[in-house]
Amino acid sequence: MRKYIGLAKRNLLIYFKDIQSVIFSMITPIIVLVLYILFLKGTFVDPINTAIEGLEDFVTAENVDMFVNGLLLTGILGSTMITVPYNCLITIVRDREGKIDYDISATPVKRVQIVLAYFTASAISAFLMAAIILSAGLVLMMLQGNLYLGAADVAKLYGITLLGAVSATALFMIVVLFFKTSSATGAFFGILSAAAGFVIGAYIPISQFSEGVQTFCNIFPGSGITILYRNVLLNPLLNQMNASIGGLDEGMFVDTLKEIFVFDAHLFGNVVGTPYIVLMVCGVAAVCIAAIAIIYPKVYQRK
């Protein structure tokens, strides 16, 4: 166990000591924030103002701002769950490229422990980075207004963060297996960073895409995790808005917002609620972990 912990610590330090790597792993969340400041907020507010027509006396501007800011936070968290674990797992490719895996394999550490050390370091890195962002985001939003979150809701948000870190790490460990050089992983990271914001709906709500594109996006765990974030973080606020309206619209305003900003996944023309999203994310993670258990020990054969 000590050897496994030592390897996991080594992989964690490699990531966190490389400040440039940490910054670049956060490039998509930073882009989401910058675009939000420049024009995305208006893009999100416009459909809300359209849906709110006739209900201006019941839904406050403060609640609308809190809702849009919550969308920003979920977009940042969702993209973090994609870019951070992948960037941390680049250590695997670097070790193979520099033949460091030969030295690691020559030690008395079991191959399963070597693989688990990479996995653990990446999952912890993703969880820590996302948890820091989540904590800061919640504090800032609570200083601006009321999110109507209870202690159970906050605990669920950190639980989603853990699930997202584990599922994303499991998926990307399969992906990095196909890269042999750091330059190739870096090139793919550029593509991943550009696509991440669209896949999770941080730039444009996925509901604006065709059914086929929605299905493609929602297959990825990162999209499902972002939807879970939206439900836990924003449902209490939506419930408060609905209560303020008092049933005058028979819940149409809240239902419209949930449909526009995707609070349920659309897969192959079917609407999938949060319980099934959790099962889907867990299923993808389980399949990937099983594949890792079979493939990676063969990659790290003793020399």
Image (cartoon, grey):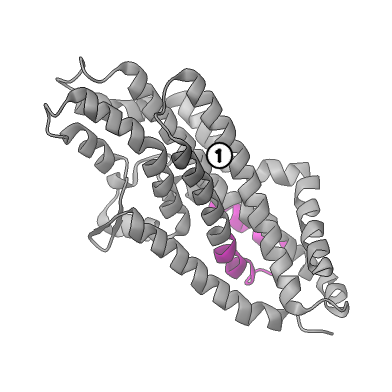
Residue farthest front in this picture: 151
Residue at the disc numbered 1 = 29
Number of numbered discs: 1
In-front residue for pair 77/240: 240
Residue at x 40% of width, y 42% of height: 232
Residue at x 83% of width, y 76% of height: 109
In-front residue for pair 162/209: 162
Q: Secondary structure at mark 1?
A: helix
Placement of the N terminus among the 4 image quadrants: bottom right
Asked whether, in this view, residue 63 is left or right of residue 52, the answer is right
Picture layout, residue 72 above or below residue 272: above
Residue at x 46% of width, y 58% of height: 221
Position in image of residue 51 (x %, y %): 20, 28
Q: Amino acid at mark 1?
A: Pro
Residue at x 58% of width, y 35% of height: 135
- The verdict on residue 111 being magenta is no
SS majority, magenta: helix
- Observer able to see residue 213: no
Residue numbers of the magenta segment: 169-193
Classify mark 1: residues with Cα within 10 Å, few (<14), some (14-19) or many (20+): many
- Observer able to see residue 147: yes
Position in image of residue 223 (x %, y %): 43, 52
Position in image of residue 283 (x %, y %): 44, 68
Position in image of residue 176 (x %, y %): 63, 66
Residue farthest top in this picture: 57
Placement of the C terminus among the 4 image quadrants: bottom right
Asked whether, in this view, residue 248 is left or right of residue 32, the answer is left
Picture layout, residue 113 above or below residue 150: below
- The verdict on residue 171 being magenta is yes
Picture layout, residue 40 above or below residue 255: above
Asked whether, in this view, residue 56 is left or right of residue 119, the answer is left
